[in-house]
Image (cartoon, grey):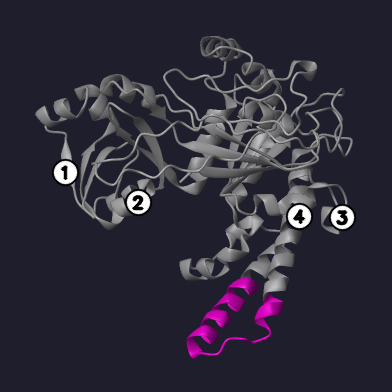
Amino acid sequence: MALKTGIVGLPNVGKSTLFNALVENSTAEVRPRPPSPSPESPGPSFRASPRPRALFSRRDDDQTDQGRTERRARSPRVSSPTPPPRSPSPPLPQAANYPFCTIEPNSGIVPVPDDRLQALATISGTTNIVPTTCEFVDIAGLVKGAADGAGLGNKFLANIRECDAVVHVVRCFDDDNVIHVDGKVDPLEDIAVINFELALADLAQIERRLERLGKGRAKSNAEKEAEQGERDALAKLRVLLEDGKPARLASLTEDEWALVKDLMLLTAKPCVYAANVNEEDLADAGATNVHVKAVRKHAETEGSGVTIVSAQVESELIKLDPEERAEFLADLGADEGGLKSLIRNAYTQLNLQTYFTTGEKETRAWTIKRGFTAPQAAGVIHTDFEKGFIKAETVGYDEFIACEGFAGAKEKGVWRLEGKDYVVKEGDVLVFKFNV
């Protein structure tokens, strides 16, 4: 499963600048995700496939103007599919210092950074590295009154309803040269505006659903019971939203959440606040920034994550080679770039983890929910793997590296053969045995 996140925020808080930097393309125009390959059925693990590296295509044909060209994330020993032909369409504005510089929703797919892949590939003599991916969806900024038609962002909320999580970009820097839509920097007020508009959109969804349920179309007793359960769940959510709280704080049972899942409520999604700071605040992760402190305190009240990023620094990093990026970040006192931090936070909020498969043909990362059993993890590769699951050869990542592969792990007794009840752990290196 690939992670998909929607980026929201007020206009001109650095949302599009951050998006452009994250997908390593200076104009925030990217092409849709390529179709997933099907695995080979006769084999212990999976089929080798090209890596879906940060893929881009422009919506206008004037590629040479202002020196704009397609770019792709640099990564050694990784192949990527050939982009399809581009079709002309209206050009998108670039990130700029004025509200509503994003007119249409954009999306970009980027590989999830994971240094463990290269280490595994080196041991296995891999010819192809395939990281898991994360898709970012950027919509126009929301403003006060968006639910009543103000601004542009409310038109595109549907584009992030199918996202797994929401990244809320909040301005946490003071700069008179960068316009703020409300004329002042107040991250808590900004958060309140966005959350209010998202809550209004969710309330509208709930009201429409309650209206349909009120028509009483259920016939059997089971259907009537299910409808009543949904009404009860919706009533709880409505009370919470009307009280100004996000739906994700609702005390619903798993069955109740399942009943309202199809509504894809925006405030029910896990949230990560991306505090956009000046480069001076990266060294101490915003510890001395009063705006960041306020955002962190607010995030704690709702169980959300906070990532410290500098959109301007991220936009400068894409011009550098990997070695130069590390030096640049070190000079700023930062341990890592914003992409790693943001995705790690999103994984935590969504309760996700990674396992690996590795061999001569391919080393690949797979994203699964924490608590997945071995058959469920195998099903992420292909449903046949789950249906015909027999056993899973298992070695922890650290043991695999220390023993320099499966053979060494067997010699030292850390190689295991796990069955259907085994719960996969973070970093497990697996080979699935199945029969269909």
Residue at left offset 10%, top offset 28%: 411
Instruction: Tell me if residue 321 is in the magenta stretch.
Output: no
Q: Which mark is residue 379?
A: 2
Above or below residue 119? Residue 226 is below
Residue underneath mark 4: 196
Query: What type is the residue that disc 3 sits on?
Result: Gly
Q: Give the residues drawn in magenta, as a range.
A: 210-235
Contact (CB < 8 A) between labels 2 and 4? no
* Crowd rating for badge 4 (residues with CA inside 10 Å; few <14, some 14–19, many 20+): many
Residue at left offset 59%, top offset 53%: 269
* Crowd rating for badge 1 (residues with CA inside 10 Å; few <14, some 14–19, many 20+): some
Residue underneath mark 1: 417
Is 360 in front, or is 410? 360
Dot 1 or dot 3: first in sequence order is 3
Q: Nearer the viewer, mark 2 or mark 4?
A: 2
Residue 100 can be seen, yes or no: yes
Dot 4 or dot 1: first in sequence order is 4
Q: Nearer the viewer, mark 2 or mark 1?
A: 2
